[in-house]
Amino acid sequence: MECPGCRAALNWVVWLDVGRFVCKGCDGVWLPHDQLGELGRKLGIRISVTSSDHTPRDAARPCPQCGDAMGEHGDAVRIDVCPPHGTFYDAGELAAILAPLIQRGQSE
């Protein structure tokens, strides 16, 4: 698969028994929806992106699985979303999203 951020090859990596594709070129991460849910379960937090949670982008990036234009989702951190397939996080975005969720989960 090709990185939607920089077009380099995406490499399959497993962390916490959850797979994701990582780009060595730009440090982006492609996370299929089923793996996103599994990551949330492993971390003890709720993470989900539904098909209605995105808006079109002006300069849409292609989904690495189907090639269709992805939309955007989020407020402070805007991630790329392909409703049927997954989400793409630019370098540091996944950590920026997960950190407060994990912190909140630990304090509850």
Image (spheres, helix red, strand yellow):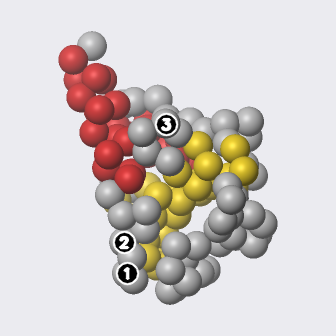
Please determine whether, in this image, residue 33 is positioned above or below residue 4.
above
Is the residue marked by circle 1 packed among few (<14), some (14-19), or many (20+) residues within 10 Å?
some
* Residue 80, picture quadrant: bottom right
Q: How far apart, in angstroms, are the residues tagged by discs 3 and 2?
A: 21 Å
Please determine whether, in this image, residue 43 is positioned above or below residue 32.
above
Give the foreground label among 3 and 2. 3
Q: Is residue 88 visible?
A: yes
What residue sits right under mark 3 in the picture?
75
Tag 2, which secondary structure? loop
Residue situated in front as seen by the camera: 98 or 93: 93
What residue sits right under mark 1 in the picture?
24
* Residue 23, picture quadrant: bottom left
Residue 79 is situated, as x and y percent measured from the top left of the image, at: 52, 51
The amino acid type of the residue labelled 2 equals Asp
The outermost residue toward the front is 58
Tag 1, which secondary structure? loop
Look at 78% across and 66% down and name the residue there: 68
Please determine whether, in this image, residue 104 is positioned above or below residue 92.
above
What residue sits right under mark 2 in the picture?
27
The amino acid type of the residue labelled 1 equals Lys
Q: Is residue 20 visible?
A: no
The outermost residue toward the top is 108
Residue 77 is situated, as x and y percent measured from the top left of the image, at: 43, 45
Is the residue marked by circle 2 packed among few (<14), some (14-19), or many (20+) residues within 10 Å?
some
**In terms of sequence position, does the residue under pointer 1 or pointer 3 come before the other?**
1
Look at 34% across and 31% down and name the residue there: 101
Is the residue marked by circle 3 packed among few (<14), some (14-19), or many (20+) residues within 10 Å?
few
The amino acid type of the residue labelled 3 equals Asp
Residue 47 is situated, as x and y percent measured from the top left of the image, at: 49, 35
